[in-house]
Image (spheres, rainbow, N blue to C red):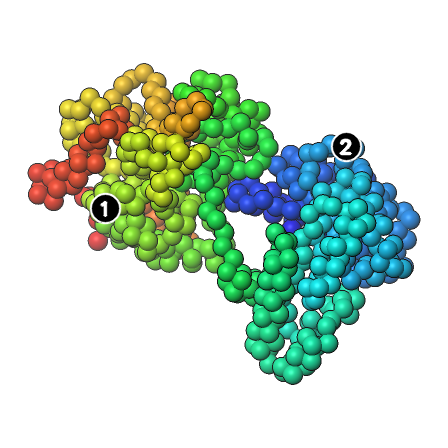
Amino acid sequence: MTWGAGGTTSESTLFLSSYIQNYIGVDVLMHITCRCLTKEKIDSALESAKNNGIVNLLCLRGDPPAGLTNYDSSQDYFQYAEDLIKYVREKYGDYFCICVAGYPGTHVESKSKEEDLFYLKRKIDAGADFIITQLFYDANEFLNFVSDCSKFGINCPILPGILPIQNYTSFKKLANLIKIKIPEELLEKLESVKGDDEKVKQYGIENCVEMCQKIIDNGIHGIHFYTMNLEKSVNETLKKIDFKVSPRAKDFPWKKYNNPKRNQENVRPIFWKNNYKSYLSKTWYWDEFPNGIWGDSRSPAFGNMMDHLNSYYPGNNIVDKKKVKQMKLQWGEKITCYEDVCQVFVNYINGKITKLPWCEESEFSNEIELIKDLLYKLNSHGMLSINSQPAVNARPSNDPYVGWGPEDGYVYQRMYIEFFIQKDKMDLLIEILNKYSSIYYQAVNKNGDILSKNSKQSVIGLTWGVFPNREIIQPTIYDSDVFLVWKEEAFNMWNEWIRLYTDDDIGQESADLLGKVRDTFYLMTIVDNDYIIPKLEQIMEDFCVAIDNKAVDVRLDFNFK
């Protein structure tokens, strides 16, 4: 994530790096430069990076901002990247993994290759962990650079920096700017096609593939691609070198992020399963996290979640017209009756739309495929599902649908369903559920009226795993007290949908209908404690059949036609 000359994009860089690291779950290498920056500015950036779980830095001297002529660098607190690296190591020890830049074609300010390698080694000796190179277009030049580094005593990993050629003019301009050596054969080929941008791009991909393959064949195990926000050529290159990403086994049923603060976290309430950004934002500043079997809201590690009920969560505010238009395409230009509401949820189950206010993920987790037919029936019969998982009894930990954790283990799950439901329909369902001792349920409306199988606090382990040579891991729980915290957010999420229709009189009818659903429905959760011979799926299917046969008489009184 680039920093901008003189730190000109530092605030954006810090924000985006933090968001990607913590909410998307992808490791970030954040650039940080020292030219034109005060010690206070550097301190602030480093502290912010650490507080937000960023652990990788690319430390550069950098350039002054564009237009800043005759800049006197002697006023800078850090003169070179080496000084910045030393400072980071002195202040933060080995917390940060530090990368530095290397130059296969020699830095433009170096008098010789030997001098360039001398200063590169000083950066490594100062505490850098690995090197990413400047651009090059001759694989032999890079391989020779790696060999020269080794002879010079530089033995850390070195990643080749590769940028596919996108356009003849921009390529020539960039090559002149950073003094890249261009092979004659490449120049001749480019000259022959320079009038055709598509042919230039295709040749750029071919050249990139050839270089990558040669580098890989010579024992280099990683490549750093520069995209310059044009990723298509990089994607095509990866396809042609048959690059495959091995799917990484999930540590837990939920996404685990690489923020060092959360390393000990191994228990979460299930309610935020499809709203992980909201959960992360609510728990970001906890000093410790729940861990161990049967962790629950009584543990101090949970913090006081009630303090965060009104905290911001991503997606809560729709303001720009472009986003309103996008959401209306998903959730309907107009909602005229209750059946329209149900159809939106059905469309989500069928993959026709990619988002609901309660579901941030753009696609289902694999396990939902096991109960997809049931979810379709529930939503088409007016039970608006927002969270669920199937029953699992000792499936291998590498199972493609429900697997997680170390190899050679087994995973287990109690079946769980969470949905919005009308009061009269829920009363009839509860009569049925009360006949089964293995079934637990809890329901609450917007006003806080609670219906529950048990009036006392209930904590139920919903997911657990058994693995060789280690204790049982139980990462997902149902907690009746935390459910009431989640209830506030879940009902508030209707507002995201309602706000789409409040800008004009035509949409007010839709807003009123959705508001009535929000204000009169209950949020209901059901847990089947019998994971060996589960009954809940059949109970819910039979209930849907009863509705079809009018054995259950439920009024649909939300039709405003």
**Residue 57: % across, % down:** 69, 44
Compute the Cα span from label 1 to label 2. 56 Å
Q: Is residue 199 above or below residue 319?
A: below
Q: Name the quadrant containing residue 466.
A: top left
Please indicate whether residue 462 sits to the left or right of residue 342 in the image: right
**Residue 186: % across, % down:** 68, 75
* Disc 1: which residue: 373
Q: Is residue 50 above or below residue 238?
A: above
Q: Tag 1, which secondary structure?
A: helix
Depth check: give the residue in front, 257 or 129: 129
Say which residue appears at 28% left-offset and 43% top-offset.
370
Q: Which mark is residue 91?
A: 2
Q: Residues within 10 Å of mark 1 (few under 14, many from 20)?
A: few
Q: Is residue 14 above or below residue 230?
A: above
**Residue 481: % across, % down:** 38, 23
Depth check: give the residue in front, 145 or 180: 145
Q: Amino acid at mark 2?
A: Lys
Q: Amino acid at mark 1?
A: Asp
Say which residue appears at 72% left-offset and 72% top-offset.
183
Q: Tag 2, which secondary structure?
A: helix
Can residue 561 be seen by looking at this rendering?
yes
Depth check: give the residue in front, 184 or 476: 184
Depth check: give the residue in front, 447 or 250: 250
Q: Which mark is residue 325?
A: none
Numbered marks: total? 2
Please indicate whether residue 32 sits to the left or right of residue 264 in the image: right
> Which mark sits nearer the N-terminus, 1 or 2?
2
